Amino acid sequence: EDIAEVRTAALRSVRNIARQQTQLVKNTHILLFTLSNLAEVRGKKLEGCSALFRNLALHAPAYADLRLCDTDGNTLAASSPDFQELPEPARAEIRAAAAGNAFAVREMTHSANNHAPLITCLLPVIQNGQATGVLVASILVRPPAAEVAKLDAQQAEHLHIVDTQGHVIFAYPPDASRRTSDHTIYCPWREVGQSPLRHGLIQNVGEQHIAFEKLFLDEEQEPYLTVSLSISTAAVFERMRARIFTNALLLLGATCFAFAVTWKLCDAGLRA
């Protein structure tokens, strides 16, 4: 029963966290689509764009960076007044998004200010059927605090959110991501990535149960994020042993109490 409860709770937590991340990306898509139809963006009124981006970032702290780039990746306007030009890998992604004329989510980057992991959403600005620029939104990825708070009670060992290359976006506990030099995650991502399922549970992987869910923009692409939660089988059995021991102590206490009461009653009867 304990194993079944733990599996169900792990799958529920993964589903809730995945749902929140999916909604965040959907909201970002809507935001960028709305921005792409504003006169400031379509007319490349750069001072107006920068003021608009700064105001959005101020009221939506999940967005670490908002910017408008040309189709070659050069920054035209940004939410930060002291922005840095994007590195070549990011510029290549922008060129690909402009050529594809579609919303895209690129791999993990790091915030220039505090090195926090980010995922970045891209949407071309389309005029007369052609991309004239690309809107870029970099998002801080944080699961709901309420879901993270449940993990200790579930005997959870590691929660990971990773991008399509296995780069760690979020880890709980914070030191749970045993990373290589290129920030790739330890084995759960690889094992989950080999599964043909979109979501489910892998049992007894390194003495663990791993619940996971993969997030897709569409069926033809790789998952842009994967949420995985590992539960130690040993920890579950330890909890079961502790519960059995506690129940045994309670039973022993009740038996001793009943014996004492019976003895007292018998003794009183004999005295009478």
Image (spheres, grey):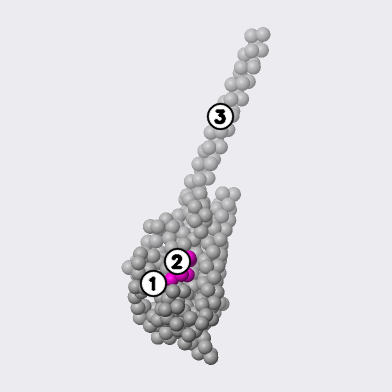
Q: Position of residue 102 (x, y in %)?
A: 52, 82
Q: Where is residue 118 in the image (x, y as percent from the top left)?
A: 42, 68
Q: Which of marks 3 and 1 is in front?
A: 1
User: Relative to 89, does residue 185 appear above or below in the rendering?
Assistant: above
User: Which numbered disc, 3 or 2, marks the residue that appears first in the sequence?
Assistant: 2
User: Which numbered disc, 3 or 1, marks the residue that appears first in the sequence?
Assistant: 1
| Highlighted range, magenta | 54-60
Disc 3 + disc 1, Cβ < 8 Å: no
Q: How far apart are marks 3 and 1 (CA)?
A: 67 Å
* Amino acid type assigned to the residue bearing label 1 in the image: Ser
Question: Quarter of the image holding residue 247?
Answer: top right
User: Relative to 153, does residue 247 appear above or below in the rendering?
Assistant: above
* Amino acid type assigned to the residue bearing label 3 in the image: Gly
Q: In the image shown, does 238 or 118 lie closer to the viewer?
A: 118
Q: Nearer the viewer, mark 3 or mark 2?
A: 2
User: Relative to 251, does residue 225 appear above or below in the rendering?
Assistant: below
Decide if residue 209 is in sight here: no
Q: Position of residue 226 (x, y in %)?
A: 49, 67
Question: Quarter of the image holding residue 171?
Answer: bottom left
Residue at the image position 61 percent from the left and 21 percent from the top: 261
* Residue of label 3: 253
* Residue of label 1: 80
Question: What kind of secondary structure does the magenta stretch mostly adopt?
Answer: helix
Decide if residue 41 is in sight here: yes
Residue at the image position 57 percent from the left and 58 percent from the top: 12
* Residue of label 2: 58
Q: Distance between the residues labelled 3 and 2?
A: 61 Å
User: Disc number at residue 111?
Assistant: none
SS for callout 1: loop
- For disc 3, the neighbor class at 10 Å (few under 14, some 14 to 19, many from 20) is few
Q: In the image shown, does 60 or 115 lie closer to the viewer?
A: 60
